[in-house]
Amino acid sequence: MIPNTLLEALKIEITHMEAGKVLATMPVDERTRQPYGILHGGASVALAETVASLGAYELCDKSTEIVAGLEINANHVRPKSEGVVTATGTVLHKGKTTQVWDIKITDEQDRLICVSRCTMAVIKKEQ
């Protein structure tokens, strides 16, 4: 967890990282629920973009490049009112200036809660 960031506020934990794949968990609780008591779509999108961002950064040249979210979409397919969700992000495309990530968010029974696609910009650092 990274202090003083959205990850800390939402209690997002990175549980696995390898080249082209990232897993993270997030609780469904008072921090991440919307007023009707179910997982907020924005919290799901924050989790998805976190996974894509960390994965994209691991695939870039850290000495000369950074990454930033360029576009994200999400389909919320099942409500979740408590427990923990797990995001699994995998790279679909790794180009020179963009990466495209597929993120599936599931519950403890491996049921699909949300599916997202995130395009990351690969940006040259200013010297």
Image (tube, rainbow, N blue to C red):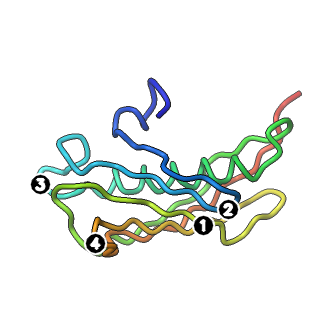
Instruction: Tell which of 110 and 96 is nearer to you.
Output: 110
Mark pair 1, 4: CA separation: 20 Å
Q: Which residue is tagged 1?
A: 90
Q: Residue furthest top?
A: 4
Residue 20, numbered circle? 2
- Measuring from the top left, give residue 69's x and y in whole percent: 60, 50
Give the residue number, with chain letter if any, for mark 3.
37
Q: Residue placed at 28% from the left, 48% from the top?
A: 27
Look at the picture and state if 1 lies above or below 122: above
Q: Which of disc 4 and disc 1 is earlier in sequence?
A: 1
First in residue order: circle 1 vs circle 2: 2
Residue 16: image x %, image y %? 54, 53
Which of the labelled discs sits on residue 109, or is there none? Answer: 4
Q: Residues within 10 Å of mark 3 (few under 14, many from 20)?
A: some
**C-alpha gap between disc 4 and disc 3:** 20 Å
Which residue does the image show at 63% across and 53% down from the upper left?
55
| Distance (Cα) linking label 4 and label 2 | 24 Å
| Dot 3 amino acid type | Gly
**In the depicted structure, whether residue 74 falls above or below residue 16:** below
> Is 4 situated above or below 18?
above
N-terminal-most mark, 2 or 3: 2
